[in-house]
Amino acid sequence: MILDHIDDENRFRDALRAWLPDALSGRPERGADEDHVAHDGRVQAWWLGVLRTQKLATPHWPKEYGGVALPFRLRAIMTEELVRVDAPTPMRYMISFNHLPATLIPWGSEEQKRKYLPEIAEEGMIWCQGFSEPGAGSDLAGLRTRAVRDGDHYVLNGQKIWSSFSVFARRSIVLARTDPDAQKHAGISFFLVDLETPGIEIRPIRQINGGAKFGEIFFTDARVPVADRVGEEGMGWKIAQSTLASERGLLWFEAAEKLHRRLDGLLVQAAREGADWPADAEMRRCYTELRARAHGMRLFLREMMYGPPVDGAEELIRTAAFKVAFSTFRMDLMSFLVRLDTPDAYQVGNTEDDYLGGAMFSYLTGYSGMFGAGTNEIMKNIIAERGLGLPKG
Ligand SMILES: Cc1cc2nc3c(=O)[nH]c(=O)nc-3n(C[C@H](O)[C@H](O)[C@H](O)COP(=O)(O)OP(=O)(O)OC[C@H]3O[C@@H](n4cnc5c(N)ncnc54)[C@H](O)[C@@H]3O)c2cc1C
């Protein structure tokens, strides 16, 4: 078992490297009539099953809920090694693996943790996140979905939007207003919702990149048990801060490794295909600059993760700065890919992985990086107001 080597980082890495080629050899091929969405789903579920044989599907979780409490550094090594061999990323399980445990472990009841976490670790339950609404994105606390107490249930009415992976999900975390008269941050509660509850409808949103992983969620008198409220009524805003913080950190670590690897591969690909762009001084200059930025991103992340801890306010400013730098780097890299004018420059919708796929798909997807996890303008507000002490507005 790879986990027999957790006392030594080098041996852990070596054990992973030795295991991966064989583990990946059974990767399902795309069937002749299979669209990429079905194929992506099959590959992701297959890969989770393979990771499970080594107890590596949810390695960072506490042991009592289906993890092995893998130390952070080993998790980073695992990410480096998986990216190095292009192992599939279980994108659809992002909320299940990150946002849900990041919320339930500090805030959930013991019963909620035992009910909802092992089913992810053992069966791969897919969750989504129903926070944003039309009119409540950056101003999330302005959300209007209502949850009205009725005996041992709440009755939900309202609409969510931009809910990633909701078209594949069975469950959702949901913020809803339980007290419309309270100050706006105080009147919100946090719920765990079974999407098969009568009165819930999910409508896919077609994206510019050809995909449709987002959905709108409509609630019409949907009854959610009180037992599925996380924390006390009115504490939803505070609890949601734990959820939102999990959108950063190691998720970016993996993305930065992927983009770095992608850049690395461009020169090899150019040599193989006899492309002429490396001989063009302007293109070479762009490439070199991108390489330097990629390297900077990776160093920045390692400093954030392994460097001395900073207090909450500084952490917020640092992650805001990283988010702006990373999303603009990503966009510049994707623009560069399109300029290379390779055959895939014209393909859209050919993968679910935001960081891979054809050049045009990556380029169109890159824009979402400026909005997801808080828009870049909101990040700049944080830097200006909290970091530099500038006045609001
Ligand atoms: C890839 C991706 C995945 C997402 N996944 C989810 C998900 O799973 N669940 C979920 O609930 N939501 C999700 N979202 C939604 C995301 O949280 C919102 O898009 C984001 O909060 C912005 O909200 P909005 O789209 O309503 O834009 P708005 O808030 O309406 O903003 C519109 C524009 O106005 C600017 N703006 C707004 N307020 C200010 C201000 N105070 N100062 C300066 N500029 C301002 C913004 O920067 C933006 O450019 C996702 C979004 C993306 C792109």
Image: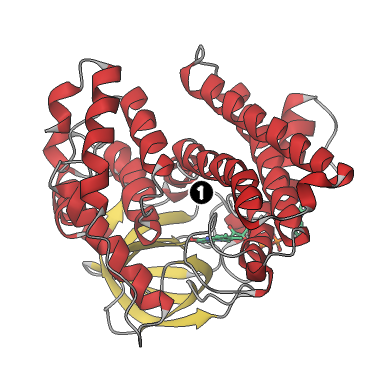
Q: Looking at the image, which is closer to me, 205 or 87? A: 87
At 57% from the left and 63% from the top, the residue drawn is: 143
Image quadrant where one finds the C terminus: top right
Q: Could you tell me residue 122's position as x and y percent?
A: 14, 54
The residue shown at (43%, 46%) is: 243
Instruction: Count neighbours of disc 1 (C-alpha within 10 A) and say few if under 14, some if 14 to 19, many if 20 or more.
Output: some
Q: From the image, which quarter does the N terminus lie in?
A: top left
**Is ligand 1 closer than 8 angstroms to the Cβ of mark 1?**
no
Q: Quadrant of ligand 1?
A: bottom right
Residue lying farthest to the top in this orientation: 308
Determine whether, in the image, residue 139 is placed left or right of residue 84. right
Answer above or below: position of 246 versus 203: above
Q: Tell me residue 306's x, y (percent).
A: 47, 18
- Colour convention of the picture: secondary structure
Answer whether residue 125 is visible to the viewer in this image: no
Vertical position of residue 62 compared to residue 224: above or below: above
Residue wearing tag 1: 186
In depth, the one of 142 and 295 nearer the eye is 295
Can you give x and y, in whole percent of width and height, for residue 140 in the image? 59, 56
The residue positioned 12% from the left and 47% from the top of the image is 53
Left or right of 287? Residue 44 is: left
Point out residue 232 in the picture as x, y percentages from the top left corner: 33, 47
Tell me the quarter of the picture where residue 35 sits.
bottom left
